[in-house]
């Protein structure tokens, strides 16, 4: 999960929806010298655009001056809020839930730099 982003030779790479143990998925930020990982439950069905939403939230939090780890934690949490709001629907429920999505309580981040296998 970490080798491919490092081959891109970019200062920071966000990788999402990486299969992880126990029926979960991981999202990681890979930096030159470390990475940050979050895991969240895998949902049976999600609408298209969740990766785009995650990337937009991550970029927005970075531009607001947050660290990469905090930006990842907030972006994953916001994406989870959007997914919970659209359960069983074909499209993401962003417009009516934007405040909750942006202000979502950050999820836990593995700050040890250990990526999922």
Image: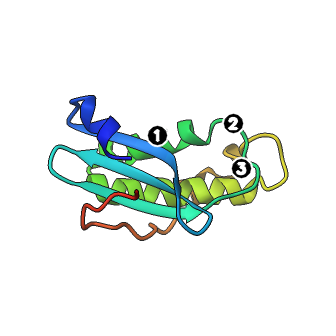
Percent x, y of residue 71: 36, 54
Total numbered labels placed on residues in the image: 3
Q: Secondary structure at mark 2?
A: loop
Q: Residue furthest left?
A: 33
Q: Secondary structure at mark 3?
A: helix
Query: Is 56 or 5 nearer to us in this picture?
Result: 5
Q: Residue at x 44, y 59 (%)?
A: 74
Percent x, y of residue 114: 29, 62
**Label 1 Cα crowd, 10 Å radius (few <14 / some 14-19 / many 20+):** some
Q: What distance separates the C-alpha of mark 1 from that of mark 2?
A: 13 Å
Residue 96 numbered tag: 3
113 with respect to 108 (left or right)? left
Q: Is residue 83 visible?
A: yes
Query: Is 42 or 49 nearer to us in this picture?
Result: 42
Question: Which comes before the other along the chain, label 3 or label 2?
Answer: 2
Query: Is 23 or 67 nearer to us in this picture?
Result: 23
Report the mark closest to the observer, 1 or 3.
Answer: 1
Q: Residue at x 26, y 50 (%)?
A: 65
Percent x, y of residue 52: 54, 36
Residue 55 numbered tag: 1
Q: Residue at x 71, y 43 (%)?
A: 92
Report the mark closest to the observer, 3 or 2.
Answer: 2
Question: Which comes before the other along the chain, label 1 or label 3?
Answer: 1
Q: Is residue 66 visible?
A: no
Q: Which residue is mark 2?
A: 48
């Amino acid at each position: 999960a970490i080798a491919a982003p490092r081959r891109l030779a970019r200062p920071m790479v966000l990788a999402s929806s990486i299969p992880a143990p126990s029926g979960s998925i991981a999202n990681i930020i890979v930096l030159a010298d470390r990475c940050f990982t979050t895991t969240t439950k895998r949902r049976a069905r999600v609408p298209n655009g969740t990766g785009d939403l995650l990337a937009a939230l991550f970029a927005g939090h970075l531009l607001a001056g947050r660290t990469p780890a905090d930006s990842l934690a907030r972006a994953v949490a916001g994406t989870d809020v959007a997914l919970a709001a659209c359960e069983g629907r074909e499209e993401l429920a962003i417009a009516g839930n934007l405040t909750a999505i942006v202000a979502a309580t950050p999820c836990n981040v593995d700050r040890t730099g250990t990526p999922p296998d």
